[in-house]
Image (cartoon, helix red, strand yellow):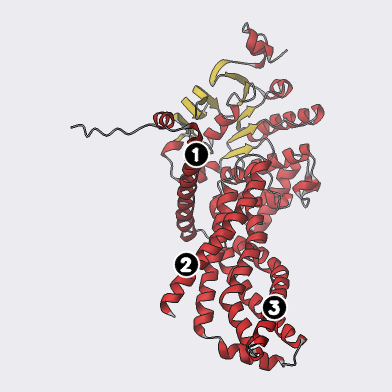
Amino acid sequence: METTVAEIEHLKKSFGTNHVLNDINLKIEKGENLVVFGKSGSGKSVLIKCLVGLIEPDEGTIILLGKNISDLKDEEINLLRKKIGFLFQSAALYDSMTVRENLEFPLRDLKSKPKEETRVLVVEALKNVGLGDAIDKMPSELSGGMRKRVGLARTLILKPEIILYDEPTTGLDPITSKEISRLILDVQKKYNAASIIITHDVECARITANRMIVIKDGICVAQGTFKELSESKDKWVRSFFE
Amino acid sequence: MSTGLKIMDNATLESVIEPSDHSYIKALKGFFEEIAGLTVFTLRFFKEAVKPPYEFNELARQSYLIGYKSFPLVAVTGFIMGLVLTIQSRPTLAEFGAESWLPAMVGVSIIREIGPVITALIFTGKVGSGIGAELASMKVTEQIDAMEVSGINPFKYLVVTRIVATTLMLPVLVIVTDVISLYGSYIGVNLKGDVSLHLFFLQVIEKVSFSDIFPALIKTFFFGFVIGLISCYKGYNANKGTEGVGEAANSAVVFGSLAVFIFDMIAVQITSLFI
């Protein structure tokens, strides 16, 4: 049986006169990888930032794991966020901390966890992304691909039920991009988490997507599988895949 | 009943004002927005500061970085300040045959005014710009957003700890600077004289009263608070992009220094009511 983990209804967001999101509706099921496709500036990142409450929508309802986020107090939102992972475009590693400290940081509120258990979790998360050796390095010592992997490890450390990827392959070479895309697929299999992947990388979409939506002018203009959209009758949608 | 008064919207207002006046209105609007933003930020600080959980580890780390690491700079500055003030004051006092007043005069000047203000200004330049640039860079690289989506309150972790650390550390640095500055003055006195360290400090202590030390120390807490507050505000609300980082660091120093002078002026007025 499918379980809806996130539901967005009539979501609207404007910045001044720039209407970025104009009535977005979507649902995502447990264990599903949903790829959001669209041109740069089409509001893809704004969509996932609205989902985690980093940006407040002008209108619409967002239900995450059965909770309407607009009804939640700050403390309740923070608790809910522990169940949601977010991989930023730049990985957003904390510059002043080592890789180990970066990974320990989201665990700091869980005082019940003994130090040894935290250490095991950190090592395991790094091994999952193939970076067991980088534990004591500083973020400035890592390459772009390694930073993304560490960012993903930090995202996974709380074993989230929903993972949001903001352009996970942007700025990476084709080989590393493919590695990151496969990693996303591995994470889906291992954690059975629902993922929303914001990208305009066709190869990443091909590897990771169970379902795709295309956003244009703030609305969802097409949805389907990778194959369906790549063979779409709509020339504009098809142009993404050519 | 109509009062005959109409509230003009922005477009109407702009249409009746000369185009050259628009920049003034924009600047005025920006000024009031800044004041409102800073007020909200200050209220949020007090709200978050009293609400548990408390970030003691980060507060200790920030106090170390802000206090201990600023020490060499303020120590050198303090020493030079005392030395130069003594050398420059000597000829004037010598003209009136009051050279023996040199330790007392320099001591009172340093403890009451020069020590707190100069240390605060150096502190703004070193610590304020650092905080402004660090927070702005964290904002630009989405590190603050990353903290927020991890379910950790970035305001409490980054802002509250830094403001409390600057509030607590500046008075400590001022005390240290005052002492080193007085030592610099002692060296200055001895360049053309022969006064023992014991006698020098005795002369200073004789002329410095509680009413000199206490208000001077109290105002440094306010200086530390306002420097931390402005730096954090500028960094935390930086615009996107690398330009925003430079701008945040620059405004932290400019507005922080200005705030130090304004608070100093207020403190002097308040002190003069009681002394």
Q: Quadrant of residue B220?
A: bottom right
Which circle, 3 or 2, is nearer the viewer?
Answer: 3
Determine which residue is flagged by label 1.
B26
Determine which residue is flagged by label 3.
B88
Determine which residue is flagged by label 2.
B266
Q: Is residue A111 in sight in this rendering?
A: no
Q: Is residue B181 in sight in this rendering?
A: yes
User: Which amino acid does the dot numbered 2 rest on?
Assistant: Ile
Q: Which image quarter is the C terminus of chain B in? A: bottom left
**Percent position of residue A186, x then y:** 71, 32
- Which of B151 and B37 lies nearest the eye of the viewer? B37
Q: Would you say the residues marked 1 and 3 are in contact, meaning their CB atoms lie under 8 Å apart? A: no
Q: Residue at x 63, y 27 (%)?
A: A198
Chain hosting mark 3: B
**Percent position of residue B68, x then y:** 68, 69
Chain hosting mark 1: B
User: Which amino acid does the dot numbered 1 rest on?
Assistant: Lys
Q: Are marks 1 and 3 on the same chain?
A: yes
In terms of secondary structure, where does tag 1 sit?
helix
Q: Is residue B134 left or right of residue A54?
A: right
- Which of A154 and A30 lies nearest the eye of the viewer? A154
Q: Is the residue marked by circle 2 packed among few (<14), some (14-19), or many (20+) residues within 10 Å? A: few
User: Which amino acid does the dot numbered 3 rest on?
Assistant: Gln
Dot 1 or dot 3, earlier in sequence? 1
In terms of secondary structure, where does tag 3 sit?
helix
Chain hosting mark 2: B
**Percent position of residue A127, x then y:** 76, 43
Q: Which image quarter is the N terminus of chain B in? A: top left
In whole angstroms, how far apart are the C-alphas of marks 1 and 3? 46 Å
Q: Is residue A162 left or right of residue A123?
A: left
Residue lying at the far top of the rendered structure: A233
In whole angstroms, how far apart are the C-alphas of marks 3 and 2? 28 Å
